[in-house]
Image (tube, grey):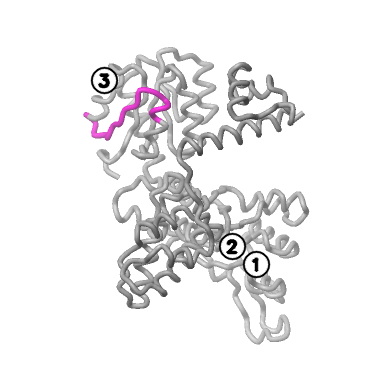
Amino acid sequence: MSQNEKKILLVDDDQDLLQLLSMRLERHGYQVSLAQSAEEALARIPVIRPHLVITDLRMEGMDGLALFDAVRRSHGSLPVIILTAHGSIPDAVDATRRGVFTFLTKPFDSRDLLREIERALTLSADTAGQADSDGDQDWRRELLTRSPLMEDLLAKAHLAAASGASVLLRGESGTGKELLARAIHRASNRRDKPFVAINCGAIPDSLLESELFGHAKGAFTGADRNHPGLFKSADGGTLFLDEIGDMPSALQVKLLRVVQERQVRAVGASQTIPVDVRIISATHRNLEEEIEAGNFREDLYYRLNVVSLDLPTLAQRREDIPLLADHFLRQFSEQIGKKVSGFSPEAMETLVGASWPGNIRQLCNVVEQAVALSTTSVIAADLVNHALRETPEEIPPFAEARRRFEQDYLVRLLKITNGNVAQAARLAKRNRTEFYKLLNRHHIAPALFK
């Protein structure tokens, strides 16, 4: 990425200092965006997709450390540099302990700032969704998105790919876990070696061991030749273990040994074979609950879960539905030789408002069915409704969505505190009088929760 493609977001409530620092950075070739508060910065980050945030520490309202905490929650791989005229050793220690990239005290030497900026950008420049050239994007070519949620996930995935660490992908069925695993493989230094995938829940227990580790000729009835197994087939590359939570306990022990020793012994063989394999695993199960229930080994969990990535549901990334639907429409139209150009506005509204329990896999199925049954160049809403076989979820107006959120939030607080209004108000960081007004507005009686 060239210097003038690197985007920096400056945050300071002093407009004069903001403009001065902006001019300095622009002279050095950076793209600079400005925000005069932390709240404005948080609104701008998903839109401009900066590579670095530089923020003042002392600001009205949310301060620089609070901004950093919010950035870390929503954009975990985005580095933050904090500047302050009120610097102190405790501030610096607290900031760096919490993960701030660096902490500079005003007045600072411009050369020091530029050096820290370049160092921060070196660590973040390769993050997914922030590289603009086609070559940089090739690793994620199968993952279509305009969702900030997905872009942040891809940024983390790209960093994980470079590290070589084992990755655990979590998410509901149909969210694209295998596509993300393939993308991580393409972004890694193993990209020229095999990518091998297996669904641990789709193969009978009696065959899964042989599929993974291989077998020697004569190891069991029907074993008329040596079989190398998927670990050996993936040597030097990546092995994707889908639905790892469905793996039988006995095989979990053997898998743990392979991960620890980097050696495989085929069924019926007396010798072990060294293997160099990067493991990416995936599950729709809650493995922590499976561990508590005794269904999954805790030691294996920590070996596989070095980096954990959570894929959002399709309902959490609704802005991607038109993009994905149009992609599938072109794909299926070409496959069956039909001239279908798009969706009617009503059909697209139906797609965007649907609940999508089957996620992207269900969307793909719905579009395929609609294309197959369409007799016109534009897909009508009735075809989409027929394929969905459900009443579309209505997106509520903003005022109604806010009312529902407030009501759910207040009820949750009162449940947590067993109806103790004073305690609930403290958790909400509101005074009791204001909190009582909120309760009255939503007709909530604290006595019901005692």
Q: Secondary structure at mark 2?
A: strand
Q: CA distance from mark 1 to mark 2?
A: 8 Å
The answer to whether the residue labelled 1 contacts the one labelled 2, judged by CB atoms less than 8 Å apart, is yes
Residue 354 percent location from the top left of the image? 49, 55
Q: Which mark is residue 408?
A: none
Question: Where 89 sits versus 288, above or below?
Answer: above
Amino acid identity at mark 3 = Leu
| x then y, percent, for residue 119 | 38, 34
Comes first in the chain, label 2 or label 3:
3
| First in sequence: mark 1 vs mark 3 | 3
Residue at the disc numbered 2: 242
Q: Residue at x 39, y 65 (%)?
A: 328
**Which of the two residues, 335 or 68, is positioned nearer the viewer here?**
335
118 and 152: which is toward the camera: 152
| Residue denoted by label 1 | 201
Relative placement, left or right, of 371 versus 2 is right
- Residue range highlighted in magenta: 27-41
